Image (cartoon, rainbow, N blue to C red):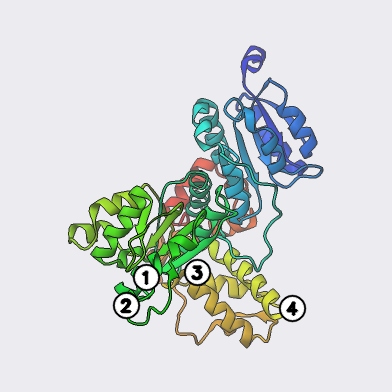
Amino acid sequence: MTAKLANAPTILVADDDPATRSNLALLLRSEGYRVVEAADGDAAAEALADTVVAAALLDLKMPRRDGLAVLRAHADRLEEVPVVVVTAYGGSTAAIEAMKLGAYDYLTKPFDLDEVLFTLRRALTQRSLVAQVQALSVEPLRDDPAPDEDELVGRSPAMVAVFKAVGLVAPADEPVLVLGESGTGKELVANAIHRNSHRAAGPFVKVNCAALSPTLLESELFGHEKGAFTGAVARRRGRFEQAQGGTLFLDEVGELGIDLQAKLLRVLQSGTFERVGGEETLSADVRVVAATNRDLKTRVAAGEFREDLYYRLDVVAVTLPPLRERRDDVPLLAEYIVKQLSRKHGWPGLALSPEAATALSRRDWPGNVRELRNALARAAILARGRVVRAEHLAGDGHAAVPVHPAHAPSGNPLDLRTAVAETERRVIRQALEQAGGNRTRAAALLGISRRQLFDKIRAHGLDG
């Protein structure tokens, strides 16, 4: 055992919470790793400078120096010593910044211990991949955004994947295609890409391609010369000119007509265009981020969207999940929106009751985050800026739906197997809630192994 430990990788565990640090250290030592611990950012930075450290688990919120500052100072050794960031904060800003700075991965608390081990093993065996996620530019450290600043919010695996993707693509200068249903936050993704790119100091210009007729849209994009058409009483700069040096966000790009698609393709390929009615060829130093809720491949097959334009836009695609596929994020999103409403309207007593949060989590939200925001704004008014209760959410035309309707009990109250299954499912859910979502602790509460718990979670549909 001594020889094994002598040759084992040394892992830095940096976290200001003694319990978290101790639990992680105990887990890693039980797996044969050597461990060094750090309780603050200065100690973490000093430990990372030691060549014996092979990888690190780094908390973002620590005294003396936070995790992002440590990560930034460690940037030149990330290929050699991968860093897995862990944090209890569920917003996108920290995740995007950490990934942009070159973190190997990003885990949110409470995390599953098996996930920690799996991620760490990947980091240790695939260190060469770290170079691909290093940031090309480093921005000054930013504090967490104020609640009235729009950002993507979520802790679900699907949203963390979006944060990581944004952190990876932002430093590049290629077009990005953002996919997702209406109301999922595609404009927020585009804005996050812009803010975290080297074009952040430049303009972020938006165009809704579905809101204008083809003639007006062409003028909106490329501008026009005086007299180009009836009503063109003066020269007008288009959005490409206005976005010079920055980012142009083309919302609902799938609605572009074929003629405009050809002109957009030309700009993407050559960076040149002419104003409507003009002969002067202009240059566009603009990064294009396009978004759509349409299936562009289907439109290409139907001859409604140019295949060459599709592939030019789809250099990198970021897909936003609908809210019904990340129900666990709904309470976090709701709290975030409530804080925004509180600041906007001057309602310091505005809050969300647990019953209201549960009711929100059980809805399908076909309108996604936009619909959730509207429902909460309505409820906040009904609550007179105080505590939003479940009854304030009633009467808006949406009925709560079970999170897992497939597991509803049968009509026979004497069906023993169904009754036992429902009881087991309820007890497992209670254990998970009591353990704060930590499956290892939940398994201990239930007196079963982690593997048994994972199997039962899948069998009862509790992993959605």
> Are there few (<14), some (14-19), or many (20+) residues within 10 Å of tag 1?
many
The type of residue carrying mark 4 is Gly
Within-10-Å neighbours for mark 3: few <14, some 14–19, many 20+:
many
User: Residue 29 appears in which quarter of the rendering?
Assistant: top right
Of residues 147 and 219, the one nearer the viewer is 219
Q: Position of residue 291 (x, y in %)?
A: 40, 61
Tell whether 68 sits left or right of 247: right
Quarter occupied by the C terminus: bottom left
SS for tag 3?
A: helix
Q: Which residue is mark 4?
A: 349
Which residue position holds label 3?
Answer: 369
Query: Which amino acid lies under the numbered mark 1 shown in the image of this protein?
Result: Ser
Mark 2 touches mark 1? (CB < 8 Å): yes
Q: Considering depth in this image, is 447 or 332 the residue closer to the camera?
A: 332
CA distance separating discs 1 and 4: 48 Å
The span from disc 2 to disc 3 (Cα, nearest Å) is 40 Å
Disc 2 or 3, which lies upstream in sequence? 2
Q: Residue at x 57, y 39 (%)?
A: 135
Please report contact status of discs 4 and 2: CB closer than 8 Å, yes or no.
no
Which mark sits nearer the N-terminus, 4 or 2?
A: 2
Question: Of helix, strand and loop, which one carries label 2?
Answer: loop
- Indicate which disc, 3 or 4, sits on the residue closer to the N terminus: 4
Could you tell me how far apart the alpha carbons at marks 3 and 1 are, in whole angstroms? 32 Å
Measured in 3D between alpha carbons, the distance from the residue under mark 3 to the one under mark 4, in whole angstroms, is 23 Å
Is residue 4 positioned above or below 210 on the image?
A: above
Residue holding disc 2 = 229
Disc 1 on helix, strand or loop?
Answer: helix
| Residue at (56% x, 47% y) in the render | 198
Q: Where 423 falls versus 132 (above or below)?
A: below
Q: Which residue is mark 1?
A: 219
Instruction: Give neighbour class at mark 2: few <14, some 14-19, many 20+ (Cα, 10 Å).
Output: few
